[in-house]
Amino acid sequence: MVTTTHITDQPGFTFDEARHEYRVGDQVVPSVTQILSDLGYSNYEIVERLNPEALERKRQIGKLVHQACHFFDENDLIEKDLPEVIYQRLQGYKKFRADTGYAPTLNEGRGIGDLYGMKFGMQFDSIGMCHGKLPYWLVDIKNASGSAQRAWGLQTAAYAMGQKLLPKVAPSAFVRVIVQLDDESGYKLYASKDRGSKIFKPEDFQVWPACLAVSIDKRNHNLERR
């Protein structure tokens, strides 16, 4: 079982794993992914309607890959028991760590972010450093063979703004990193420090609060995405 660190100071916080539902008391709190879907940055809802079986399979593979990477980070993984597709993607993650010298210090941080009183559910994969030196990297693992998505930049901005385990680190001080794993190239690396990135933008820390406000307003007034 993956050990997840709760990063919230919200009393009454709970998370329903089966429904992937964040709550504070009786209040359901939308997740970062749901909020970005509301604003059209993600097509998960469309894919789920058209091919729910394929999407569920991808979700299960993604969950197992994340667990394998987590246990590898915790030095508690038995690789011989892994299915082939999970084993192959784990090799990509191991290569990423070897190439960059990255080592996580915080794993699987889950909780409630709060911006100007607006709450959102979040879970980052890890925060750490390369070769033990600053700056901190905030890393998110993606199991996808397609093109990189603009949503990833906003997603990691949300995590940087919502995390509370390193309160003295400004959101913009994190190097936000996407490690995209696949069965062919091993991994692709996208980082916010890369100039000209199509994923990460300096304005991410303004765009995310705007997305959050619009999504919450739509939910409060029962305005569903069309």
Image: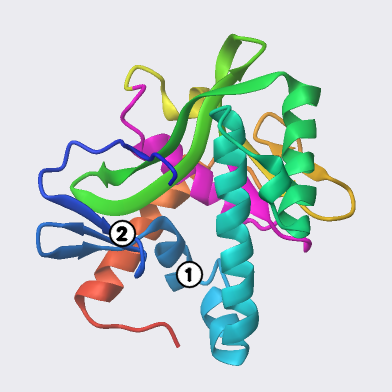
Please give the name of the residue rendered at 51% of the width and 79% of the height, measured from the top-left corner: 45
Q: Position of residue 11 (x, y in %)?
A: 10, 43
209 or 1, which lies in front?
1
Please give the name of the residue rendered at 59% of the width and 55% of the height, measured from the top-left corner: 64
Assess disc 1: are there few (<14), some (14-19) or many (≥20) residues with their C-alpha within 10 Å of its C-alpha.
some
Q: Which mark is residue 81?
A: none
Please give the name of the residue rendered at 41% of the width and 19% of the height, measured from the top-left corner: 169
Q: Position of residue 161 (x, y in %)?
A: 38, 37
89 or 48, which lies in front?
89
- Mark 2 or 1: the one toward you: 1
| C-alpha gap between disc 2 and disc 1 | 14 Å
Q: Which residues are magenta?
A: 140-166
Q: Which mark is residue 37?
A: 1
Residue closest to the far bottom:
50
Is 128 displayed left or right of 186 in the figure?
left
Identify the amino acid type marked 2: Ala
Query: Residue tagged by mark 2?
Result: 213
Is 194 displayed left or right of 157 in the figure?
right
Q: Position of residue 52 (x, y in %)?
A: 57, 85
Does residue 197 appear in this view?
Answer: no
Is 166 displayed left or right of 173 in the figure?
left
